[in-house]
Image (cartoon, grey):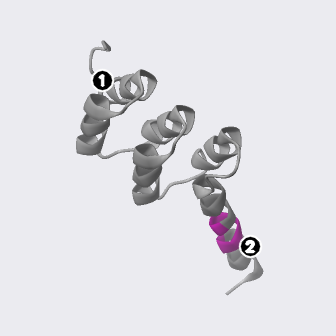
Amino acid sequence: MSLIDLLSSRFKRRVREAALDQKSLWEARMNAVYRLTDQSLLAQIALNDPDWNVRSAAVWLLTDQSLLAQIAKSDGDPNVRQAARVKLGLQVKD
């Protein structure tokens, strides 16, 4: 493993940890979310993060249409539902 590979894997691990750390500020978690590409991790965050800002950020990066539809219908926050509807290309109403 090259030095670049090692540094890259460490960076990815730290970003993942930051995104999932419920004790960190929502701004830090949201910043970490924007660096993620792992769809299963983004789905987990979109469904479970306690802050709507972080869930919305994850929604914008999701590609799973059925998960977006589920979030558009059932998330507890209207901002997250709206983000999912916009991502799906649906008319925004709540």
Whether residue 20 appears in magenta in the rendering, the answer is no
Magenta segment, prevailing SS (helix, strand or loop): helix
Which residue is at the far bottom?
Answer: 1
Q: Mark 1 = which residue? A: 89
User: What residue do we see at 60% from left, 61% from top?
Assistant: 16
Is 12 located above or below residue 27 in the figure? below
**Mark 1 Cα-neighbour bin, 10 Å: few <14, some 14–19, many ≥20:** few
Find out whether residue 11 is within the magenta segment.
yes
- Range of the magenta residues? 9-13
What is the three-letter code of the residue carrying label 2? Leu
The picture places residue 10, in percent across and down from the top left corner, at 70, 72
Under circle 2, the secondary element is helix
Q: Quadrant of residue 30?
A: top right
Vertical position of residue 76 compared to residue 17: above or below: above
SS for callout 1 = loop
Identify the residue at image location x=25%, y=38%. Answer: 70
Q: Amino acid at mark 1?
A: Gly
Q: Nearer the viewer, residue 70 or 7?
A: 70
Left or right side of 37 for 63 = left
The spot of residue 29 in percent (x, y) is 64, 46
